[in-house]
């Protein structure tokens, strides 16, 4: 590799224009998705979205991109190299959906007040920020002792249910737009198709979907609910809005701490692992950034953002080698920060949201869910596939319970009012869904780790996870709808019994010397499986 040297780092290189266009488009798409989630899923008023949340989000993103530009400048100055590329950063996309669908939406629906959901989201980020800041010390330990199948499997469960299902349904409800945009994205991001002048596939999909939507509106079919009146009204959000401290709202959300902790802590740990991986990726591309500084910066920037009203976490993005290969250096990161401030502080996102149909963005969300789900199987040993499936199940249960609760709530009733026995007679095991789906992230992680370690025949370590599961269950962090003492005693007892069985296996059981198999097994007689 040829290394270019210079006396003083350049703040802007020609390649920064290419990186700014690509990375800026990525950030823009994320802001549009975020705005759609806030307005149409959480039903938050525009005054809150455009007057409080987006200005705070813009501030956080600006601080993040400026910091990583400074870090790149510092590295370039220390090494004398002119090819140093800043780390890309922005809103953590998986966590954007998690905090929306797992934290804010249930609380907003239960209370009937979207502001309460916003406050819970702020508290969620507050907790995660400290996990990130102290995680430089514990993250590597958690990563070392927990099988990857468990970490990625639990995340895949969220991606399959709370991230993928809603956009998939929306696409098929408006298939002319949704499925067409999905094909454009698949052709590029999976099929390698390059569009005109290298325009990003996400931007092409949004442009095509928007064109179809407005043509349908003009012809009187109105596929996506767009209107010229709504577009004109969106200009009313033009103006200059700066972030306003929201410290009181942050602490108001602490009343939902029990719901928040069961997701904030494990996802904070996932953020640590992801950041470590991305810093390692940048090092492989020739740019060695200090891990502690990166992790601390994500935590501090996210904390500032939430205290100003932003309910989304900041993260270092994957893709540093790609932006570097494109010619990105220092300036593209700082330039993106300026772009974000202009979009979020002056109300421009409002106009773009009224111009672009949500269904044109839905395929991007489904793609993200597909990637996260596929990663669990691609980045883990083949033998651990059953562990991933087990880790998925608690989130499926949580999603199913949420669908039942929403449907019954819309009908003006509840599972309690109908009666669990009647639901059971109709093959709806509501109590089972409640127990299995409560604390689904931690539940999936524990069950996935148990299964993976048993497959590896590491019975003592599996027993340790079983005992950890008993403790977490006893205090209500999993298999319970509220944190407390002795919430689901029988489930906690079952984990203790599992641990005892595994200790017995470690000390007394004999195992075959051959590797475990995941081939189809015989059940109830001879079964043949043919292609």
Image (cartoon, helix red, strand yellow):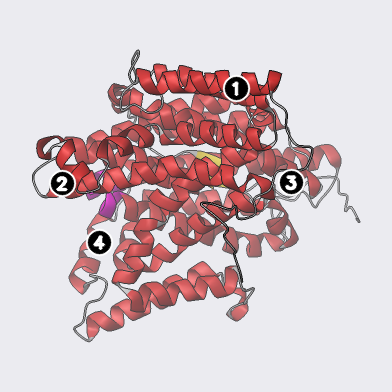
Q: Contact (CB < 8 A) between labels 2 and 1? A: no
Q: Residues within 10 Å of mark 3 (few under 14, many from 20)?
A: many
Of pointers 4 and 3, the one earlier in the residue sequence: 4
In this rendered view, identify the residue nearer to me: 425 or 156: 425
Seen in the picture, residue 204 relative to 170 is either above or below; the reply is below
In front: mark 3 or mark 2?
2
Q: Which quadrant does the C terminus fall into?
A: bottom right
In front: mark 1 or mark 4?
1
Q: Which residue is mark 1?
A: 463
- What residue sits 57% from the left and 22% below the top? 501
Q: CA distance from mark 4 to mark 3?
A: 40 Å
| Total count of labels | 4
Q: Residue 49 magenta-drawn?
A: yes
Numbered mark located on residue 282 in the image: 3
Q: Residues within 10 Å of mark 1 (few under 14, many from 20)?
A: many
- The rendered magenta stretch, by its main secondary structure, is classed as helix
In this rendered view, identify the residue nearer to me: 529 or 476: 529
Q: Contact (CB < 8 A) between labels 1 and 4? A: no
Q: Residues within 10 Å of mark 2 (few under 14, many from 20)?
A: some
Q: CA distance from mark 1 to mark 3?
A: 37 Å
Q: Residue 197 magenta-drawn?
A: no
Quarter residue 228 falls in: bottom left
Q: Which residue is mark 4?
A: 234
Q: CA distance from mark 4 to mark 2?
A: 34 Å
Q: CA distance from mark 3 to mark 2?
A: 49 Å
The outermost residue toward the top is 485
Measured as percent of width and height from the top left, residue 289 is found at 74, 37
Quarter residue 102 falls in: top left
Seen in the picture, residue 222 relative to 56 is either above or below; the reply is below
Of pointers 1 and 4, the one earlier in the residue sequence: 4
**Kind of element beneath mark 3:** helix
Q: Which residues are magenta?
A: 38-50
């Amino acid at each position: 590799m040829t290394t270019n040297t210079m006396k003083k780092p350049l703040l802007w290189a020609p390649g920064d224009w290419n990186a700014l266009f690509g990375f800026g488009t990525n950030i823009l798409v994320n802001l549009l998705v975020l705005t759609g989630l806030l307005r149409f899923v959480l039903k938050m008023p525009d005054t809150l979205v455009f007057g409080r949340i987006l200005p705070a989000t813009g501030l956080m993103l600006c601080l993040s991109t400026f910091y990583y530009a400074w870090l790149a400048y510092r590295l370039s100055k220390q090494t004398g190299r002119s090819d140093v590329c800043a780390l890309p950063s922005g809103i953590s996309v998986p966590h954007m959906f998690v905090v929306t669908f797992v934290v804010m939406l249930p609380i907003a629906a239960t209370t009937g007040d979207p502001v309460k959901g916003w406050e819970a989201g702020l508290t969620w980020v507050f907790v995660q920020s400290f996990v990130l800041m102290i995680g430089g010390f514990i993250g590597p330990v958690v990563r070392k002792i927990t099988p990857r199948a468990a970490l990625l499997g639990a995340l895949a469960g969220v991606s399959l249910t709370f991230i993928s299902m809603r956009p998939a349904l929306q696409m098929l409800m408006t298939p002319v737009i949704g499925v067409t945009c999905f094909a454009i994205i698949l052709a590029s991001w999976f099929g390698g198709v390059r569009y005109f002048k290298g325009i990003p596939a996400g931007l092409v999909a949004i442009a095509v979907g928007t064109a179809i939507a407005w043509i349908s509106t003009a012809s009187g079919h109105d596929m996506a609910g767009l209107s010229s009146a709504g577009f004109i009204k969106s200009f009313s959000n033009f103006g200059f809005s700066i972030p306003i401290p929201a410290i009181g709202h942050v602490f108001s959300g602490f009343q939902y701490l029990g719901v928040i902790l069961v997701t904030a802590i494990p996802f904070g740990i996932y953020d640590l692992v992801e950041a470590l991986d991305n810093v390692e990726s940048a090092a492989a591309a020739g740019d060695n950034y200090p891990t502690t500084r990166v992790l601390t910066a994500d935590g501090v920037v996210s904390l500032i953002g939430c205290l100003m009203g932003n309910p989304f976490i900041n993260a270092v993005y994957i893709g540093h080698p790609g932006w570097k290969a494109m010619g990105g250096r220092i300036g593209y990161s700082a330039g993106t920060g300026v772009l974000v401030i202009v979009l979020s502080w002056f109300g421009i996102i409002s106009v773009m949201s009224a111009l672009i149909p949500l269904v044109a963005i839905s395929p991007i969300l489904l793609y993200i869910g597909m990637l996260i789900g596929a990663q669990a199987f691609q980045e883990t040993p083949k033998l651990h596939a059953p562990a991933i499936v087990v880790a998925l199940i608690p989130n499926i249960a949580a999603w199913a319970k949420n669908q039942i609760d929403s449907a019954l709530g819309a009908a003006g009733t509840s599972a309690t009012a109908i009666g669990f026995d009647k639901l059971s007679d109709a093959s709806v095991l509501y109590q089972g869904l409640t127990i299995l789906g409560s604390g689904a992230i931690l539940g999936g992680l524990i069950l996935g780790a148990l299964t993976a370690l048993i497959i590896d025949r590491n019975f003592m370590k599996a027993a340790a996870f079983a005992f950890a599961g008993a403790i977490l269950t006893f205090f209500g962090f999993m298999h319970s709808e509220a944190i407390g003492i002795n919430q689901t005693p029988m489930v906690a007892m079952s984990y203790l019994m599992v641990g005892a069985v595994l200790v017995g296996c470690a000390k007394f059981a004999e195992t075959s010397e051959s590797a475990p198999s995941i081939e189809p097994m015989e059940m109830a007689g001879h079964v043949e499986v043919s292609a």
